[in-house]
Image (cartoon, helix red, strand yellow):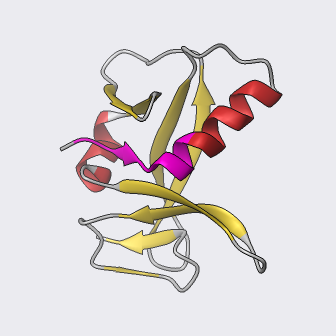
Amino acid sequence: MPVTLTEKAASAVKKVYQENGMPETTCLRLAIKGGGCSGFSYVLDISPAPAEGDEVFESNGIRVIVDPKSCLYVNGTEIDYEDKLVGKGFIFKNPNAKGSCGCGSSFRA
C-alpha cells in the first residue's frame, strides 16, 4: 500500500523545495525511529534520490521514499498538513498505529 500526501501536504513540501532551490526530482523521505512518548517517531527528511532498496511512491507530484524497515510500519499512511493559529505541521494518518501520543508525532504498533 502506498504512502500518500494530501494536496495541502504536497503544497507545503513543494514550497520547501522552491524556497531552498531544490529540483523537482528531490524526494521526501519518510522513516520511523524508536522513541517518542508512544514508542516510534516519524521522521521526514529531504533526499536527492532514493537509496537502494527504498520503496518509491508518487503522490500529488511528490516522490515519497521509505526504507524497507520503515515500510513495515507506515504502509498506507496518509500525510496531511495543518496550518492553524495555534500550530502548523504535518499530520500522519497511519492505519498501522495501535495508538498515538496527543501531538500525533509518535505512535505504537
Question: What range is drawn magenta here?
Answer: 2-10
Q: Depth check: 51 or 24 in front?
A: 24
**In percent of the image, x 60 and y 41: which residue is there?**
11
The answer to whether 74 appears left or right of 19 in the picture is left
Left or right: residue 23 versus residue 75 is: right
Q: Residue furthest left?
A: 1
Residue 83 in which image quadrant: bottom right
Task: Give percent across and percent down for residue 12.
Answer: 64, 45
Q: Which sits in the foreground, 34 or 62?
A: 62
In the displayed structure, does residue 86 sit left or right of residue 61? right
Q: What percent of the width, then of the height, locates residue 18? A: 75, 26
Q: Where's the N terminus, which quadrant?
A: top left
Give the vertical position of 31 relative to 46 (above or below): below
Q: Where is residue 45 shown, x and y percent of the image?
A: 61, 38
Q: Is residue 62 above or below residue 13?
A: above
Judge whether 103 appears above or below 66 on screen: below
Is 89 magenta? The answer is no
Q: Residue at x 32, y 44 (%)?
A: 3
Q: Does residue 6 belong to the magenta stretch?
A: yes
Give percent across and percent down for residue 27: 52, 25
The number of discs equals 0
- The extreme bottom residue here reads 102
Query: Which residue is painted at 43% across and 33% down in the image?
Result: 64
- Residue at the spot 58% in from the left edge and 19% down from the top edge: 26
Nearest the viewer among 98 and 84 is: 84
> In the picture, which quadrant includes the C terminus?
bottom left
